Amino acid sequence: MKLRTALLGAAAVLAWAPAAFAERGTDGEVKLTFPQAVSIMNPYLSGGTKDIWASSMVLEPMAGIDPDGNLITKLAVEIPTVDNGGVSADMTSITWKLQPGLKWSDGTPVTADDAVFTWQYCTDPAGGCSQATKYEGVASVEAVDPSTIKVTFSGPKPNPYTAFVGALSPVLQKAQFAACLGAAAPTCTDQNNMPIGTGPFKVTGFTVNDTVSMAMNENYRDPAKPAFASAVIKGGGDAESSARAVMETGEFDYAWNTQIPPDSQAAMSAAGKGQFVVAFGTLVERLEMNTTDPSADLPEGERSTAKHPHPILSDIKVRTALSKAIDRSILVEVGYGAGGKPTCNVIPGPEAWASDNEGCIAQDMPGAMALLDEAGWKDSDGDGIRDKDGKKLSILYQTTVNPIRQDFQALIKDWWTELGVEVELKAIDPGVFFGGDPGSPDTFQKFYADVEMYANNSDNPDPETYLGQYQCKNAPTPENGWQGENINRFCDPMYDELHAKLTQTTDVAERQAIAKQLNDMVTKDSMIVVPLVHRGTLSAHSNALGGVAINAWDSELWNVADWFRVK
Amino acid sequence: MTDAAMPKPVSQNRAIWQQFRSHKGAVFGLIVLGLLILFVLIGPLVWVPEKLKVAEAIRLKNQGPSLRFPLGTDQLGRDMLSRMMLAGRISLAVGLVAMLIAIVFGTLIGVVAGYYRRFEGPLMRLTDMFLALPLIPLLLVLVMLFRDRIASVIGPELGAFALIVFAIGITSWMATARIVRGEVLTLKEREYVLAARSIGARPRRIILRHILPNVVSPVMVAATLGVAEAIITESVLSFLGLGFPPDFPTWGRLLFDGLQYMQVYPERVIWPGLAISLTVLSVNYIGDGLRDALDPRIRGR
Amino acid sequence: MLTFTLRRLLLAIPTLLAISLVIFLLVDLAPGSPMSEIPLTVPPDVRQRMIEALGADQPVIVRYVLWLRQFFWVEPATLFDGWFGTTWAEGEQRILSWQSRSPVFTIIGQRLPQTLTVIGTAYLVGILIALPIGIYSAYRQYSLFDQGGTLFAMIGFSVPTFFSGTLFIIIFAVWLGWFPTKYDTQLVVNDWDSFIKQIQQMALPVMTLGLANAAAISRYMRSSMLDNMGMDYVRTARAKGLSERTVVLKHVLRNSLIPVVTVIALGIPAIFGGAIITENLFGVNGIGAALIGAIHANDIPMVQTLAFIFAVLIVLFNLIADVLYGLLDPRIRYD
């Protein structure tokens, strides 16, 4: 009798535990702050990460990605695979099934038509959809029945999880956006700022580039969530002030993108109000070597083009020497602290995709000097700078204006000077550098310098598209208006061939092997890209906020429904 | 009534200098400015920091003041004293030259617009336009159009200096011009100017002898403000890639870089802040002394 | 004076049109593109389509004429429709920001209240502190008060707002915990508590900006007073037996105001232009923060509209200053 009661009691506790733990809307307000303010809540019209993360609290895709890089369901019942029949055996179609009873925050049901509409919305050529790559290779999206969506590809698609997966391609409500197709897309201000979604929150107020106010979505599919009754995202300021508002003054619960110097991180953590969290995706700070001659003496239109190979950096020995002279662990210590790790790879993660290349981690100054000697660069006139055939070993090294990057420039200049290389530094306004304006000499695509430094990443754990950047055809040239992603003008037919093979391969293990090989071809084999630091995204949350699980593969706010107030 | 009409017992320049010398603040300002200039010019020759390898320097980062590093070290273990001296060269040069350009240009426009009615309209509309132009796009356009061209003629460093001074000068003369014009408008209706005009003095002479000495005091204030503004603006320019290469420190940039370390290592912002304030303070006192010295009413006493 | 004012107002129209064209060309010529904040993961062809959807690939003159039409016809018509329920502007495209796709005037409307309350208060506080300091410093030149005032002013303008603002945050928000560091733009003032909250969150930005403004204005006031202090008319007034108070505050002050009026008139448009650094630092969503954000994102419609409104204010307030000169010194005539 006694035992029975105890068991019943335990069962009751177990059954009630989750509900007692979190009941919808009982934890008040959660306050987030972003250093860059939110401009628009429609991810299809924005490319800015700030907008996409904010909209992920409201709009949801079929499936998301968890911190380990695994697919998880959002609106879908299950993840379609070849095994469960969701993906056709020839990889030409994928079929998503909606969870039963899903409702938009306005109470109307979610149907397959909404997904079909979303596809039409983003692929309309006049709409200027910024996530168009997510729907690349999609031949059609059909509603098989009100809760089944079939996506058909124009050919076999080894990675079918692009459309409707992740915060970059959520489902829009057809009823709300019906009048916003094509050229009308930008004019739908109310829709773009206050989209109706299926996520745990709904927008209640939006001031452009300042504040997004949200309330819990009464129709969210999990009746126990979210724990917070409302949420607010305040934007503006800088990384420093955002971090301070969470870690020192406690005004906010969560701050995204709080990249500040390691010393300040330590000092702020000491205040004891919150903690920094870091997630490592594929973001790599790297040096890009120019394989073409950027000399100002060449006529405009021939500078930095394949017509003239680089007089110094065409030699792999020089490139290798420059990489060997760098001590990456010092760079991490100075610039990123816990938010970075030394790396030699363009694809540093997920682990299964990353090459085991670690040859560059240890600094090797004597080795670097020997290589330069071997290449014929010797200091013949005793001025401390190496030369060859009367030409000085002199390098212009450019990057954007950013305190950490300027520290990196100073350190790397010191090492290279020790090596006998003359280094001229240049820092450019990031808006100009990344702006891609063909009229400006300072864009990273034009690359009117010998070496440049910036960070880039893959927006998908599967790096197929990302690795595609280094194909010959993607080199920026005057003919294509300097629009291209192959910044180094790297051109190796073997690479192109192998990448073509990657796009055809469906077996995951084989794909990973090819990706590693491609990674090695642009890094250790050719030293065209010299990776420096694998950067994490550093965010901060208050000790009074529970449930945070930072994620580098999807929106950082992917599990905001699970957040709760620590009491 | 006007000093032109009075006999001169001593030469005017001499009198001005005597009055200036007797102004305690002015002498103090002159000495401080002189010391600052010595500090940045002679300092780097006297104080040569030890050459450290990167790995050694990093272990010495963010140190407080000591005998080895009188002003401490920065986040990369570099000696702050030698950086302050190098930075001062650029900041003082940019601050003083850019201020002079702005003041001379502004005063010229202001006097001409205030005195000659037919130039007033066009010049003041030009001033309005320069006031209205958004600064950052203007600077970015300047960089894009001129940086490489100037650099190819006079070299990258001198080119950067010329461009910075020009950019600051061209964007900060407008306030001076409007203030001077306002003063000239009332001065030219004063009795002594009317008197000078009625005896047939030429406009040039009236402007030089009667008007200019009387607009000195607002111009001096504008000059004082201008130095501080130019030093700070230089650091803003470097964010746009318009400034010197990133390995050239300037006071403005040191101040801005130190900002993120302000809580942990406050001395990192105190040194450059102090240097800028001292420069501005000394220019201000020199300006005060100059104003008093140029004012015949005070000089006579 | 009236004909002068009218003539200047008429003349302002072509001036402003010319200024608007210069601004447009300048902003268009500046390097950068509306795509500069789009992540590198978005490929070039998608970027190209986004630019086309914005209309940013049209020739500059086409975009300028479109902007003129939108600014001078569509926007006023929309405003008119909003007031009287007419349909003049129906189906017309308003000026849309490239960055946020929201109408530029909606954004300005959202931001004007903060600009006026925070930046406006700071300016007013600055003037109210500066004038007495300037007057008294001049009256007692080289006294302890004057030296103190000089030091205050020197620190005020040699220390940039990015420095003083951060310093205030560390002292008053982090150490003392008196004031918030981020401005809550959604706060509605409807009772005593929310009023106190509003005062608290305004304190830091107002202090930062007020200090900088007060420093400059007090110097002009002092120097101008000093110039007039030694004048013969002051001696005459004193000899007539007028009280010191009347001499200083009536005769000297009035004659010393011309440069001060100029400086203040130059400063008022700057209130609307906003205090870029301070707004950014404290998260006040004023117009300055919008302008700088738009410049960095190369959001030409937004930059152009704000810069033009700014130009209108500059022309207007400089005209007001000119009219005030005439009132302060009746000898000044514009014919």
Image (cartoon, rainbow, N blue to C red):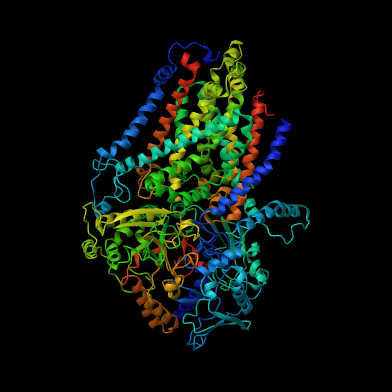
* Image point (21%, 56%), residue name: A380
Where in the figure is residue A175, as x and y percent of width and height?
A: 67, 72
Left or right of A377 on screen, residue A123: right
Residue B153 shown left or right of residue B298 in the figure? left
Question: Where B222 sits versus C187, above or below?
Answer: above
Determine the image quadrant of residue B177: top right
- Looking at the rendering, which quadrant does residue B195 occupy? top right
Depth check: give the residue in front, B232 or B118: B118
Q: Can residue A68 be spotted in the picture?
A: no
Residue A159 in the image, given as x and y percentages of width and height: 47, 80
Query: Which of the 4 image quarters holds residue C127?
Result: top right
Describe residue A508's horizontal placement relative to residue C20 as left or right.
Answer: left
Q: Is residue C302 above or below residue C52?
A: above
**How far from the left and from the top, in percent, is residue B202?**
57, 21
Q: x, y percentage for residue B107?
A: 53, 31
Front one among B259 and A477: A477
